[in-house]
Image: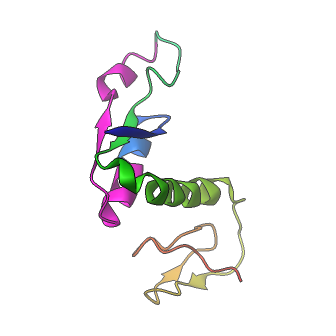
Amino acid sequence: MKRIYSAQHSPEAYYVKGLLEEQGIACEIRGESLSAAQGGVPITTETAPTVWIRDGEQYQTARAIIADYERLQRRPVSSGPTWVCPACGETCEAQFGQCWNCLAPRDDG
């Protein structure tokens, strides 16, 4: 087991876990019960929910997936026209950096 990601809250941890599992990377969330105490406890990597991968050999692949997720989170919100997903053809609203249907990243190039 190897820690791969410290989330800000449980929903984010589950989202990242889902991204990894979609790519065949077995993982689990730890520390979720500690996050419930965050109202009275400082938020640190020790109290935040964390995502752990089971196979350390998948670490680099998992980091690349998480890096894509983090890059999309930093993308400024756009109010421009809708876009069509290059992977599944679904129409997505401008503010989304990835397809809501298949989670493929938006292709701005």
Count of number-bearing discs: 0
Specify start and end residues of the magenta stretch as a single range: 16-39
Q: Quadrant of the C terminus?
A: bottom right
Quadrant of res 50? top left
What colour scheme does the image use? rainbow
Q: Residue at x 53, y 14 (%)?
A: 42
Depth check, front residue: 59 or 50: 59
Let me know if residue 81 is in the magenta part.
no
Q: Quadrant of the N terminus?
A: top left
Above or below, 106 relative to 71: below
Q: Residue at x 37, y 53 (%)?
A: 57
Q: Position of residue 5 (x, y in %)?
A: 47, 41
Q: Position of residue 75 (x, y in %)?
A: 69, 59
Q: Position of residue 85 (x, y in %)?
A: 52, 84
Q: Residue at x 72, y 75 (%)?
A: 80
Above or below, 66 relative to 79: above
As drawn, the residue found furthest toward the top would be 40
Depth check, front residue: 7 or 77: 7
Depth check, front residue: 71 or 60: 60
As drawn, the residue found furthest toward the front would be 57
Let me know if residue 19 is in the magenta part.
yes
Q: Specify whether 77 is left or right of 13.
A: right
Q: Position of residue 100 (x, y in %)?
A: 44, 70
